[in-house]
Image (cartoon, rainbow, N blue to C red):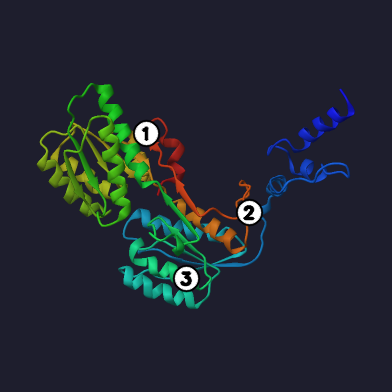
Amino acid sequence: MTQHSRDLSRRRLLFGGAALGAGALLTACTSNEAAPTAAQTKVAEAAAGGNSTPGKQVTIGFSAPAADHGWIAAITNNAKAQAGAYSDVKFTSVEAGADAAAQRAALSTLVAQKPDVIVLLPHDGKELNAFGLEAMKAGIPVVNLDRAFPDARAYRLQIKGDNYGMGVAAATFIAEQLKAKGVSAPVIGEIAGMDELELTQERSKGFADTLASYGLKVANRRAARFTADSGQQEATGLLQALPKIDAIWNHDDDQGIGVLAAVNQANRKEFFMVGGAGSKKAMEDIQADNTVLKATVTYSPSMASSAISLARLIGQGKGMSDLVELQVPKEIVLASETITKENASNYLKLGF
């Protein structure tokens, strides 16, 4: 091997990939070698604990609708807990009120306090879009959580679950189970959430599109309100409309408590059900395997924890340590996963 070949081999060892430790990257540069790239330097900083180290003090303003069901309560609880994990974060929360107009008024008082970043789960993304534009124009980055603003200029970061993917996951599980059981021309029911929300529309579209790819369709669809009472009411109507059912997808595990109550009241056991979001109660029922609920597809409120962590980085002008880019991405969509009896124990820690 020539001296030139030995030099090339040495450089490959020093700078060949992200798996190198911080010490190797920081000491690898000598007078006759190229300096580490920005990507390599960032890997070294991450390995040294970069983003977890306390930095510039950041005030994060937060607003989410009142906790009228478990998922929303978990959103606020997760956000507060995550903020409390950082010594360099001040968390300021404002009440969202009963509707979009009330939340807009509360957010105006928050803007007047000039936080570094605002994390916002709106009552309705379309109705609060104007606020996002206003805050961004005032120089306050907005992290839009869950219910999407339609205008990309209204947020610095949008983080949400994969609503279309929830429908895909639920339909795939149902179709494969029915296929395995040899059921032909199955009767499939759907109990959605709030139909006026884009996220509900996306979930139903993912469900319908995927069922269609298997040659299947929904026989009866009802829209509830993400609450146990509305779930029971709509499930009762669906069960009365369909004397025989093979499978049901219920979009939300909170309203699923009411759906299961209606199922038990009607003494219907001929079908299986898939839930949505991934509540602790749903996972426990799936593990116990003593109800019609056999799976749920995730839409985890842990996204609120991630939103706070990313808002902190935005306020400090940092990027995500595992990415080469110097800034936090513009959009993050969390994948929807299917929880069954076989893997429920892995997800319980994320249940709400």
Q: What is the C-alpha distance between the residues marked 2 and 3? A: 23 Å
Q: Is residue 284 left or right of residue 53?
A: left
Residue at image location 21% in from the left, 53% down from the top: 230
Kind of residue sitting beneath label 3: Ala
Q: Secondary structure at mark 1?
A: loop
Neighbour tally class for label 3: few under 14, some 14-19, many 20 plus, Cα within 10 Å: many
Based on the displayed image, in which of its 4 quarters is residue 129 positioned?
Answer: bottom left
Q: Position of residue 153 (x, y in %)?
A: 46, 63
Task: State the residue position of label 3.
Answer: 135
Residue at image location 30% in from the left, 68% down from the top: 99
Q: What is the C-alpha distance between the residues marked 2 and 1? A: 38 Å
As rendered, which of 24 and 303 lies closer to the eye? 24
Image height check: is 317 above or below 40? below
Q: How many marks?
A: 3
Neighbour tally class for label 1: few under 14, some 14-19, many 20 plus, Cα within 10 Å: many
Task: State the residue position of label 1.
Answer: 340
Kind of residue sitting beneath label 2: Leu
Kind of residue sitting beneath label 1: Thr
Q: Secondary structure at mark 2?
A: loop
Q: Is residue 182 left or right of residue 335?
A: left
Q: Position of residue 271 (x, y in %)?
A: 20, 32
As rendered, which of 186 and 96 lies closer to the eye? 186
Which numbered disc, 3 or 1, marks the residue that appears first in the sequence? 3
Image height check: is 264 above or below 329? above
Task: State the residue position of label 2.
Answer: 326
Dot in front, 2 or 1:
2
Looking at the image, can residue 289 be seen?
no
